[in-house]
Image (cartoon, grey):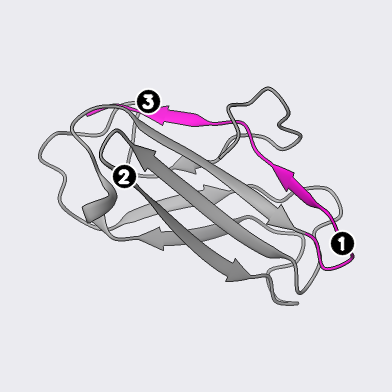
Amino acid sequence: MDDGAHATLPAPELLEAEDGFLDWEYAGPLTVRVPAYPGMRANDVVTVHWATGLGRHDESVRVTGVWAGGALAIRLPNRCLSSSANRISYSVARFTGGTETSRTLIVNR
């Protein structure tokens, strides 16, 4: 996961959070929105990185022709959540070669 120093892509969004905070009582699944990025194409692999002080969870999806050019909504289990800072970013492994990383979103509970 990139600390943002070399990030070339915008940060993701956590749809269940508001202004960087997630309600303490929220217990449902988590939806990370990865915005459409320049040059998005079928067969790119997008990996969401969720890190806390207690561990890390990575979830990858391959972009299909249907998704190419649009935002992706990637579901994660709520077991990823920590009571402290949750650091969320993503990386894109391009079908044509090369990898880019996003800025990091920090969500607190």
Amino acid type, mark 3: Gly
Q: Which residues are magenta?
A: 94-109
Numbered circle sitting on residue 65? none
Q: Quadrant of residue 50?
A: top left
User: Which residue is labeled 3 in the image?
Assistant: 20
For marks 2 and 1, give the CA distance.
29 Å
Element type where label 3 sits in the image: loop
Residue 31 pos. (x, y %): 40, 54
User: Which residue is labeled 2 in the image?
Assistant: 55
Going 57% across and 57% down the picture, which residue do you hit?
47
Going 64% across and 47% down the picture, which residue do you hit?
35
Sequence-earlier tag: 3 or 1: 3
Q: Is residue 46 above or below residue 16?
A: below
Amino acid type, mark 1: Gly
Q: Main secondary structure of the magenta part?
A: loop
Q: Is residue 101 above or below residue 60?
A: above
User: Around disc 2, counting alpha carbons within 10 Å, would you say few (fewer than 14), some (14 to 19), or many (20 or more)?
Assistant: few
Residue 23 pos. (x, y %): 19, 34
Q: Is residue 94 left or right of residue 91?
A: right
Identify the image quadrant of the C terminus: top left
Residue 45 pos. (x, y %): 68, 65
Amino acid type, mark 2: Gly
User: Which residue is labeled 1 in the image?
Assistant: 97
Q: Is residue 12 above or below residue 105?
A: below
